[in-house]
Structure formats: structure tokens, C-alpha cells
Amino acid sequence: MSVEQMREVDATYRSLGRRAVWDAVSFASFQGWESTIRRRAVARLQLQPGDRVLDVACGRGSNLPYLRRVVGERGQIVGIDYSETMLAGAQQLVRRNGWTNVDLVKGDAADMQFRKEFDGALTVLSLTVIPRWQDALQQMAGAVRPGRRIVAVEASWGSGWRRVWNPWLRLLSRVTAGDLGRDIPAEFRRSLMSVQKEAVSLSTAYILTGTVPQPS
Ligand SMILES: C[S@@+](CC[C@H](N)C(=O)[O-])C[C@H]1O[C@@H](n2cnc3c(N)ncnc32)[C@H](O)[C@@H]1O
């Protein structure tokens, strides 16, 4: 990330990362369907108890309860995020729940360097935010074992009558430093197999699922 991009992510999520503010932003982003969408995204990973899963740009840890429910106490969750303020929220959540199998790491998702160590990777509302998002997706594909899945949840502009949502989405993307113009489905198709896209939240968001190919 360039210094300028780092500053933007840091500044944006320093102010959004406080609990009450983040809860409001999250509620607005998912329009009341947050738990349904997070649960569905986690289900698409097809994880088993004991699996190891990566949560990319984990933020305040909103996915952790859903991931923890499927991998159980024998599994392991690694969350990575660039913002210390967001990570502090995730750390509080982990401490409050006494979870001993969640590791939280500060870092740039585009430089992760994990190697075929995970049984799945999830990223929610973040590939539209991470400056070097294509590199982050490549790193996710490198981190996950072949045959296992990567799932992303992202917002998208409405088309047809659904354009009525676009002023709202424009406001949200400005607040969260998100770029809804990124063609994340195309990048999934370039890097992964069996890519599926499912519209959610009145088609203002989608869940993408892809399988990591065998190395050629
Ligand atoms: C809209 S929030 C989503 C947080 C979380 N995934 C969720 O669903 O609540 C976007 C997150 O991306 C993180 N982020 C942005 N750029 C990043 C990068 N290069 N590496 C890691 N995290 C990054 C931000 O700090 C923020 O926590």
C-alpha cells in the first residue's frame, strides 16, 4: 500500500472502529440482514469442526461468532486487519468470550504470505476497501488448500429499478472508503474454480464462492 492509501484506511477505520459507530455502519450496510448474510457466507465455506479458517480484513470480529460456531473449539481462526482500532474491537470480543483458538494479526491483506495452511478464507465488505485488493485475493488463494473455498461478501450498485438504492450505497461507500466499481466477480473467475454469485440484501450485495484450484 502507498503511504497515502495507508493513511486513508487508518483514518477512516480509526473513526468508524468505535463500537457504537461500527454497529450503526454495519446495520446500515446489511439493511437488517447482517446475521442471515454472515451465517450464509460462513455456510458457503463448507467448514468442518476442527478446521482452520482465515478471516481477511476481520475488522471488529463480526464474523468470529459464526466461524467459531462451525470450526468449534478444536478449530482455529486467524483474523487479519490493517486497522488497530478495528482489531482492538475484535480483541475485546475474543477476551469477553474467552476464545482461546482465535489469533488476531495486524497486517496488510495484500502481503499475507500464508501458504496452503487454511481450510477456507472469508472476507466481508473488504475487497471493495483494500487498496491492493487483487493481491489480497491472490494471497487468499495462496493461503487456502486446493479444493477448499474462498467466500467474499460485497456490496454492488443496483441496476434497473434497484438503482433507487444507489444514492444510499454511494453514501455508505464514501463513509467506508469502499469502491463499488471493482469487478470482484471477474477476479474470482480468473483465480478460482466453480465460482458462484448469489445476490442478497435486495441485490445491493452478493456472496461470491470459489474453489482453490490444484497448483499447475
Ligand atoms: C468495511 S470493513 C469490514 C470489516 C469486517 N470484515 C466486517 O465484516 O465487519 C473493512 C475492513 O477492511 C480493513 N482493511 C482495509 N484495508 C486493509 C488491508 N490492506 N489489509 C487488511 N485490512 C484492511 C479495514 O481496516 C476494515 O476493518
Image (tube, rainbow, N blue to C red):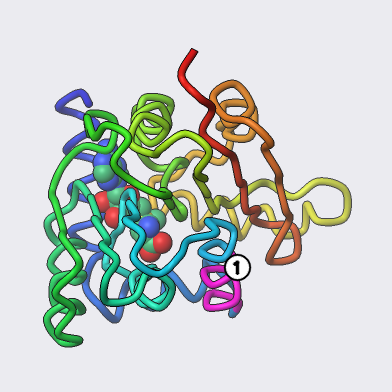
Which residue is drawn at the image coordinates 74% and 57% (left, top)?
Answer: 203
Q: Position of residue 132 (x, y in %)?
A: 35, 27
Residue in front for this viewpoint, 127 or 45:
45
The picture quadrant where one finds residue 72 is bottom left
On screen, residue 202 above or below 114: below
Which residues fall within the magenta stretch?
A: 33-40
The majority secondary structure of the magenta stretch comes to: helix
The picture quadrant where one finds residue 141 is top left
Residue 34 in magenta stretch: yes
- Left or right: residue 164 versus residue 148 is right
Q: Position of residue 92 (x, y in %)?
A: 14, 78
Does residue 42 show up? yes
The kind of residue tagged 1 is: Arg
Q: Position of residue 91 (x, y in %)?
A: 14, 71
Does residue 12 show up? no
Label 1 beta carbon within 8 A of ligand 1: no
Residue 6 in magenta stretch: no
